């Protein structure tokens, strides 16, 4: 089966809701957040990220002269536009609204946020119903709290 049909789920940062993430995005977010946390230079950042994610960082950087930073330039993730306020990289609870089938979305609760896009939250009591709805839509669903924590930037926390 195609990997784009694989979904992992686990608890949110606060443990009060369940987060569902398409597996390729979960892996990408985990890697991206790990590299953003660990990189101290733009060269380390370039080496650790996919080309697309690196270019997103360059686009979000305030380079003042419009040029790509040198590999030896110091890197600090909080200096990237949108990083510190949670707009970037994407937040899985917001992504629920874009990829989930309607049957699954109906089991969640859409919540506005103060600064960012709306999110779709799922009560853990509804996990079995959400998983069943995703499976009916053709997804392979696996509970993986570690993968979700890493995608949310909470691995090792």
Image: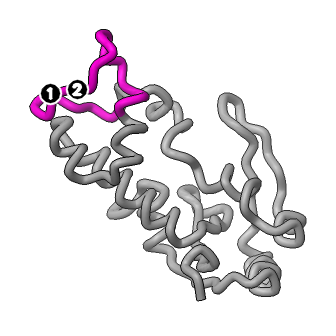
Q: Is residue 154 magenta?
A: no
Image: 145 above or below 66: below
Q: Is residue 136 above or below residue 94?
A: below
Q: Residues within 10 Å of mark 2 (few under 14, many from 20)?
A: some
Residue shown at the point (69%, 82%) measured from the top left = 139
- Asked if marks 1 and 2 touch (Cβ < 8 Å), the reply is yes
Q: Quadrant of the N terminus?
A: bottom right
In the shown orientation, is residue 96 left or right of residue 155? right
Quarter of the image holding residue 83? top left
Examine the image and state in which quarter residue 129 appears.
Answer: bottom right
Residue 26: percent from the left, percent from the top?
Answer: 49, 65
64 lies above or below 16: above
Q: Residue at x 31, y 45 (%)?
A: 36
Q: Residue at x 36, y 18 (%)?
A: 62
The part of the chain drawn in magenta is 58-77
The tag on residue 69 is 2
Q: Secondary structure at mark 1?
A: loop
Counting from the top left corner in percent of width and height, residue 155 is at 37, 62
Q: Quadrant of the C terminus?
A: bottom left
- Give the x, y percent position of residue 46: 24, 45
Q: Which residue is more in the foreground, 125 or 63?
A: 63
**Residue 51 appears at what percent x and percent y?**
34, 49
Residue located beneath label 1 in the image: 73
């Amino acid at each position: 089966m195609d990997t784009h049909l694989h979904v992992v789920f686990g608890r949110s940062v606060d443990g009060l809701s369940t987060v569902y993430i398409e597996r390729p995005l979960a892996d990408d977010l985990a890697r991206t957040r790990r590299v953003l946390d660990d990189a101290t230079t733009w060269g380390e950042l370039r080496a650790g990220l996919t080309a697309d994610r690196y270019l997103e960082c360059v686009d979000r950087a305030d380079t003042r002269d419009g040029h790509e930073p040198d590999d030896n330039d110091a890197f600090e993730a909080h200096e990237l536009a949108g990083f510190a306020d949670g707009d970037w990289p994407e937040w899985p609870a917001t992504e629920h609204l874009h990829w989930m089938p309607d049957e699954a979305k109906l089991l969640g609760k859409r919540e506005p946020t103060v600064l960012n896009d709306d999110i779709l939250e799922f009560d853990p009591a509804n996990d079995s119903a959400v998983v069943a709805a995703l499976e009916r839509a053709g997804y392979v669903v696996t509970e993986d709290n570690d993968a979700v924590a890493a995608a949310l930037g909470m691995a090792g926390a």
